[in-house]
Amino acid sequence: MLEDALGAVSAAADLQELQEVRVRYLGKKGLLTQQLKGLGALPPDERREAGRVINEHKAAVEEAIRERRAALERAALDEQLAREAVDVTLPGTQLPQGGLHLLTMVTHRLLDVFTALGYEVAVGPELETDHYNFESLNFPAEHPARDEQDTFWTTDGRLLRTHTSPMQVRYMETHRPPFKVVVPGKVFRNEAVDATHEAQFHQLEALVVGERITMADLKGAIDEMASALFGAGTRTRLQPTFFPFVEPGAEFAIYWTHPRTGRQEWLELGGCGMVHPNVFEAVGYEGVTGFAFGFGIERLALVPYGIPDIRSFYQGDLRVLRQFRGAL
Amino acid sequence: MRVPHDWLAAFLGDALPSVERTVELLDGLGLAVETVHELPAAPAGVVVADIREVEPIEGSDHLVRAVASDGRQNVQVVCGAPNARVGVRTALALPGAELPGAGFTVSEREVLGVTSRGVLASPRELGLYDYAGGLITFGDDVQPGTPLAEVWPAQTVIELELTPNRADAFSVLGVARDLAAKLGVPMSLPHVGADAGDPDVDDGLRLEVADSAACPRFTLRRIEGVRVGPSPVWLQRRLAGVGLRPRNNVVDVTNFVTFELGQPSHAYDRRVLREGVLQVRRARPGETVTLLDEESYRLSDDDLVIATPGGEAGSRAIGLAGVMGGLHDSVVADTDDVALEVAHFDPVVVRRAAKRHRLSTDAHYRFERGVDPDLPPRASARAAALLAEVAGGRVHAGITATGSDQARAEIAFRPSRVAYLVDLEVPLDAQRRYLEGLGCEVREAGDDAWQVRPPSWRFDLAIEEDLVEEVARLHGYEHIGQTVPAMHFVPPIQDPTHRRLKEALADAGLQEVLNYVFTGPDELARAAAPAAAVTLSNPQGVERSVLRTALYPGLLAAAALNRAVPSLALFEVGHVFLEGREEERVAMLWRGPWARGGWRADQPLDFFAVKGVLEGLAAGAGAELRCLPGRADFLHPGVSARVLWQGEEAGVLGRLHPEVAARYELGEVYLAELQLPLPAGRVRFAEVVRQPYAERDLAVVAPARVAYAELASLVRDAAGPDLASLEPFDVYQGEQVAEGQRSVALRLRFQLDDRALTDDEVDVRMGNVMRAVRDAGYDIRA
């Protein structure tokens, strides 16, 4: 009987068969259960011995069933795991790949720098008036200085701003010094479009006004920006030039290592200077001085990446746009 | 402005530094150097020669056989130049000479049976200046046989990119003056000492200036007995250096003085001036004049003209003042009596005329920026002396002129402002030296109080800050230190560039693109966008003639461009231009599939996938987003929603109208366009509820046209405040429900924050819900 039972346990092919075996021997009407129930019919002196044997058999069968169950369960799990295995080398589901435009990434980087230096960020309209774009910035009417900025005019006498500088005046009209502010944004020039000239591009403008701001503060601010962008100790240079809304005026350049050619050279970046008294007068400021500087953002994207054609920024070709990923 | 380095030497002598150092100094002075050109000498193997014989060649309508003499030998050449005439002195390139502008080496060759033993060369072939319409010609200053390179050496030309304020630097004199002031050296002035003429001596000329505001100064000087011919080589070379083409000695002198002193001038054939009278007046409306460019111009009374007596109206325009001379007044080959005009014209008058007639000349360019108003008599003396020198004329002792020198107002200047504004310590004597070097008169009026009278040529010096810049510029910006302003300013924390939104969209799988703000009316119509509200008056083509009224047309164009990309998600943040306002928006575009399976099934794109993106954005901003049925011309009428952000109309979301999609050859496309900013929600902390919730399901059968939002709102109102969440988990239309009906299965969760709800309490609430549903006329599905 024990051999039969153990044989049946080890022969059980799955958990259900094993359960049947259990019922057959250990169930309420199981063979071993029946034997135990039959003990009462035995004479008392045999009863004890017989009971011990039966209980031993019962324990042995239970143990065997437990072992068998464990083995079967393991096999079932192994089988399930094998069934569920995948080929991890097949490609994954392709979710749409998002990303920021390179010009946005460059702008963000610049705003990070200026925010860290304590500047406020402001923005303004792209459709402007002659007043904000030229007149309040000390561009006299009928002056060739206006020709330097080929302007898109609208039929109702407005214009697309040719620089971010109108925001100098707009900001000053609504704020009191001291302040430090940067203005990123689109600007427009009606110039022949080619690989290095676009009719639409981006600038970043900085304006700092306080009680005694000097041109050395301007140089210091440009230096700080250059160090933040290109590494500590990056040299900068100011050279005199003319913009109607600053006096003295300068253009600034950064001495950098060209990331592609490895050559050290001056990168002409933009214009700057001390805010012209006429501009302060236009917004009713007195007793303050200030500096402003501004530059094109495209150049900071084109040159380091060796992008041959500025027009590719606005053509929406994903094969171009998607190349610029991750940190700059 | 092109400045030959050795022309600067004529002003500065030995004090002129090397080319490299000069370039450095000019950059530092704000006269930005754009390029340095190395102009070669005349090629070796080219000699000056006279043409002795010219005869036609049989079989050619333009080639001639010419014999040229270099003084020792006669050389036979074949030549096709129209000015190959006996007596012309020109350049003969002998075999072996390399002609850079022609790209060949001269050799002996046969042309139509004639042996050509050299080449008579044009300026372009010689590489000297850009003219190929005839042979280069010379006068008596060079002798036949002279190697041309000896008299026409190489020169270095510095090209400056001048700013519009520095009108004074549009001349070699002006550039030299800045260098001299910077270097602290004296300068020799070519126009000082020349005979200025005596206004009391009658020269037979008369001036009638009708508008002295537009023409405050005018001088006429007579030079008699000139012989028009080629300019001397030195003069030709100077003009070639600044990029001009030499023409004849008289015209060349006027051009030379334009570049030397910055003063435009014009030489008239005296015979053109009827009765010796020259008039300056406004044009009569409709009057015409033919200018040097051989074009006829119709004038208005805004135009200032040079005229002479004659014609039907008694005065005939012969030139456009300050812009261009007339075709019929200029010197010709047999001119022997010249009247030289050197005048000053109002910058705005000249600028308007040049703009109106679309003319750009060396004269207008200088006048509109401002020429030294005191210069005319001095430049006239210089030009007259030069004419006499190079054209053999006699300068008349008299001069006919109007106007006088005007003293400039003084500028109050505090030398301490240099340190105040620029943070440069410049000693007082150095400041004075700089200002005087530039031509200012400096008068000390007190402690830290100077009166500075700027020179007549510096229009740009008007206020104290201008003088501060002059001192700083000459001292050198390189000496400016770098400091950090001591300032108390705490910037507000804002996100005006919508950086968070852009990053969230990029993270949600959308690629940012940037489009032009200008577009075309056709493109807006094609995209079914609102018609333009703003039109450009000077666009770059009709397809860029208006400003965009929506962002999505740009995304559609980008989607069409990227048709080959299997699954597309794009966004743009930018401005649109509507009637009376400029608005900032974000637009999104999706073209499926949502996710590509590749070797297995794709995840399809539909309205709810993209709505989920917007809901994700809102959730990220802690804002509430709702979509209600809406209409937009460009959207599928059945798949189109108004988007409410925090309860405010923010824009639209939907599927692109199939008709519009077909125009772009796009399939199913989804679009959203929302107005910015999309404000973040206000966060209010709520204690986490630890009580269990009770969940009940309910299937409502209602007409399919009843929006889910309507059902949800009905259920919410009936369920009361303990309804913690409501979610649809199945939406069914088909055999199981009646035609036109829809079953929406809802899962409701009820929860109290202080204790568990009993079954009875939940039943009461569900009873209310079911009653409300039935009262609304809807069924409840078992």
Image (cartoon, helix red, strand yellow):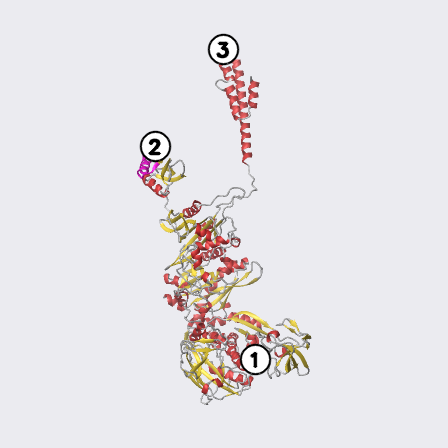
Three-letter code for the amino acid on which mark 1 is drawn: Leu
Specify the amino acid type for callout 3.
Ala
In the rendering, at what x and y percent does residue B276 appear? 46, 87
Q: Is residue B204 above or below residue A150?
A: below
Q: Secondary structure at mark 2?
A: helix
Q: Name the front one of labels 3 and 1.
A: 1
Q: Which residue is mark 1?
A: B235
Chain to which the residue tagged by mark 3 belongs: A
Q: Provide the residue designation for mark 2.
A: B759
Say which quadrant the N terminus of chain A sits in. Answer: top right
Gap between marks 1 and 2 measured at Cα: 111 Å
Magenta residues span B761-779
Q: Is residue B54 left or right of residue B249?
A: right
Of pointers 1 and 2, the one earlier in the residue sequence? 1
Q: Chain of mark 2?
A: B
Residue position marked by numbered label 3 in the rendering: A41
Secondary structure beneath disc 3? Answer: helix
Image position, residue B215 (x, y; %) = 42, 80
| Separation of residues labelled 3 and 2 (CA atoms) | 56 Å
Query: Vertically, is B124 above or below B492?
Result: below
> What is the chain identity of the residue bearing mark 1?
B
Q: Does the CB distance between marks 3 and 1 fall below 8 Å?
A: no
Q: Residue furthest front?
A: B59
A32 relative to B669, above or below: above
Q: Mark 3 and mark 1: span between their CA atoms?
A: 147 Å
Does the rendering let one see residue A156? Answer: yes
Q: Position of residue A200 (x, y in %)?
A: 47, 61
Are marks 3 and 1 in one subunit? no
Residue B34, magenta (yes or no)? no
Relative image position of residue A268 (x, y in whole percent): 51, 64
